[in-house]
DNA sequence: TATAGAGTGAGAATCACTATCGATAACAGG
DNA sequence: CCTGTTATCGATAGTGATTCTCACTCTATA
């Protein structure tokens, strides 16, 4: 697998290339860490490229379904979205500034699989997120 | 019912021992896996021991704050509660019936800690949940 | 360019959860 | 047992995120 010739903002096959979709993608691209749908909607409005709330959610859900963005839920249960490198991975998120680092571990993947097998579970998948305070925010 | 294991239903210091609190604890005790606040409320009503919605949430939150129940969020973002054995552990939850198995792994704990240190993060904690289909539900 | 139908968006609907606040009941002291 | 204090209840009205509706708009393509 070399670098896919696919543009970052090109819609998935069957999807149309609209101003709104590009705007949401752009906002995600610009974000440093995770951003909520509400935040993205507000930023687009502030940037003079307003997109309807329903559309923001629609695009984000579509991107999540096609694996183009990752979704985690914060303590309040609100969905947070982030543009990510393809492939399975997890995040180490700063609870102060929202900055996120992608991490992966074959050890965890294997552990999850073994735990499932040991207990007779099939189709096992897992939710793993790490939270903490990043070095930049720690010195506050 | 010989010696009532009042330990399980004893309120935290400063908390009063009310019928409602006992009812919610009882419902959790009776549940096999995770249960939502809505489900607990419905079950109590069906059992003839109705408790107000607000109270169910209040008691559940209190129990969660004092570490007497574990909370996870399902795919829809709804909170799911479960009476648990004390101590840090994770869950392997059946997506079909909600049955849950407690699992733990020093490997994961260590991995989380190392990942945090490697990236300059402090006060690192983690969310880890495993989901799958249990053997009983797999044969459907 | 004409056109089918995917995409959009304002607003209503839904849904889990929280805040309000007068009524009620637990518990300690008498 | 009686009673005052006050934690706790709970019916109900929010609150805030997310989804649904559906008439209208615009992309992709013949």
Image (cartoon, coloured by chain):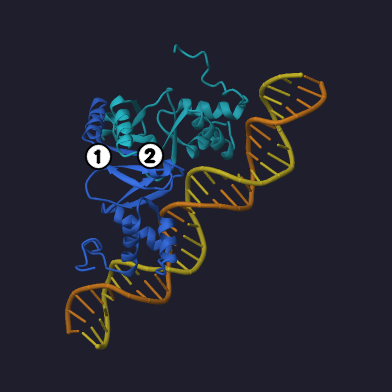
Chain colours: A cyan, B blue, C orange, D yellow
- Based on the displayed image, in which of its 4 quarters is residue B114 positioned? top left
In the foreground, C11 or A139: C11
Can you see residue A100?
A: no
| Residues marked 1 and 2, same chain | yes
Could you say where residue B80 lies in the image, as x and y percent from the top left? 38, 50
Is C27 placed left or right of C16 in the picture? left
Which quadrant of the figure contains the N terminus of chain B? bottom left
Residue at image coords 32%, 62%: B26
In the foreground, B29 or A16: B29
In the foreground, A71 or B1: B1
For the residue carrying disc 1, how many other residues have a C-alpha within 10 Å: few (<14), some (14-19), or many (20+)? some
- Based on the displayed image, in which of its 4 quarters is residue D29 positioned? top right
C-alpha span from label 1 to label 2? 14 Å
The residue labelled by disc 1 is B104
Is B4 placed left or right of D9 in the picture? left
Is B104 placed left or right of C18 in the picture? left
Q: Secondary structure at mark 2?
A: strand
Residue at image coords 27%, 51%: B84
- Based on the displayed image, in which of its 4 quarters is residue B68 positioned? bottom left
The residue labelled by disc 2 is B131
A103 lies above or below A129: above
Is A16 placed left or right of B105 in the picture? right
How many labels were placed on the picture?
Answer: 2
């Amino acid at each position: 697998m070399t670098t896919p010739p696919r543009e970052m903002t090109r819609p998935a096959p069957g999807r149309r290339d609209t101003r709104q979709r590009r705007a949401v993608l752009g906002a995600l691209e610009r974000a440093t860490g995770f951003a909520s749908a509400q935040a993205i909607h507000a930023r687009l409005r502030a940037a003079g490229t307003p997109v309807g709330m329903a559309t923001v959610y629609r695009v984000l859900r579509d991107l999540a379904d096609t694996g183009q963005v990752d979704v985690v839920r914060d303590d309040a249960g609100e969905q947070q979205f982030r543009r990510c490198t393809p492939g399975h991975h997890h995040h180490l998120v700063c609870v102060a500034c929202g900055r996120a680092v992608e991490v992966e571990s074959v050890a965890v993947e294997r552990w999850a699989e073994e735990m499932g097998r040991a207990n007779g579970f099939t189709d096992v998948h897992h939710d793993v997120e790490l939270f903490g305070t990043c070095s930049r925010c720690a010195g506050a």
